[in-house]
Image: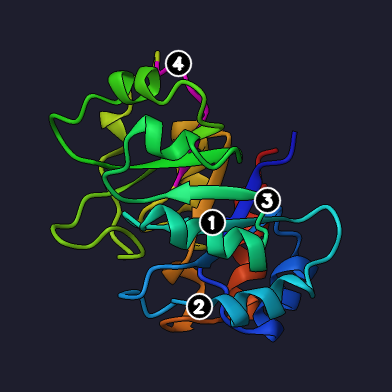
Amino acid sequence: MAMRVKICGITRKEDLYAACQAGADALGFVFYANSPRYLSIDRAASLLRDMPPFVQSVGLFVNAEPEYVYSVLRAAPVDLLQFHGDESPEYCRQFGRPYLKAVRVRPGVDLVKYATDFSDARALLLDAYVPGVPGGTGKRFDWNLIPASLPKRIVLSGGLNPDNVAEAVCKVRPWAVDVSSGVESAPGIKDAAKMALFIEQARLNH
């Protein structure tokens, strides 16, 4: 099977088109105001109208008030929710949508417990731990911290780029890979050539 690829932090229509043209399986839209990739609900709704068929849309939230998530879903109904903060399993389940739970990995984090607690998540998204920053840091974590017996699909994130994604796929064997800053020319501005190369390298051995 081809490795699945999510391009996160889409803010412009030209980047949406380029990512889909390059073969992305999913695109991420950031609803977190402190991110340089943040989108207003209206802007996200406009981008979603240009999504082609068979490419998933993913909405990223960080400790958002439930009503805000519901307001996004009403105006910009993404296919999948991604929770990047300290959300509980009960919080994640209340929206009646499939979701990913992000975990910022560092020594001492019990990924097996996360997999058990978030048993109905579609996958755990594993990202790098950087104090005070919930994601999109461009930092890589130690892949050896991932237990081989983790009973959950993995979406691997954190510091991936066209130069290291093939190695990441070979070592970790994730279900999918997720990239944001590693394919940008500036925060929130994607580079079409980098996206195409990233997707090509992610699927090199598949």
> Mark 1 belongs to which amino acid?
Tyr
* Mark 3 crowdedness (10 Å alpha carbons): few <14, some 14-19, many ≥20: some
CA–CA distance between discs 1 and 3?
13 Å
Q: Of callouts 2 and 4, which one flags the residue occurring earlier in the amino acid sequence?
A: 2
CA–CA distance between discs 2 and 3?
16 Å
Q: Which residues are magenta?
A: 150-156
Residue 154 located within the stretch drawn in magenta: yes
**Residue shown at 65% from the left, 80% from the top:** 15
CA–CA distance between discs 2 and 4?
33 Å
**Residue shown at 42% from the left, 52% from the top:** 66
Q: Which mark, residue 79?
A: 3
Element marked by disc 3: loop
**Residue shown at 38% from the left, 80% from the top:** 36
Decide: is 62 above or below 108. Answer: below
> Mark 4 belongs to which amino acid?
Pro
Q: Of callouts 4 and 1, which one flags the residue occurring earlier in the amino acid sequence?
A: 1
> Mark 2 belongs to which amino acid?
Leu
Q: Of callouts 3 and 4, which one flags the residue occurring earlier in the amino acid sequence?
A: 3
Circle 4 sits on which residue? 151
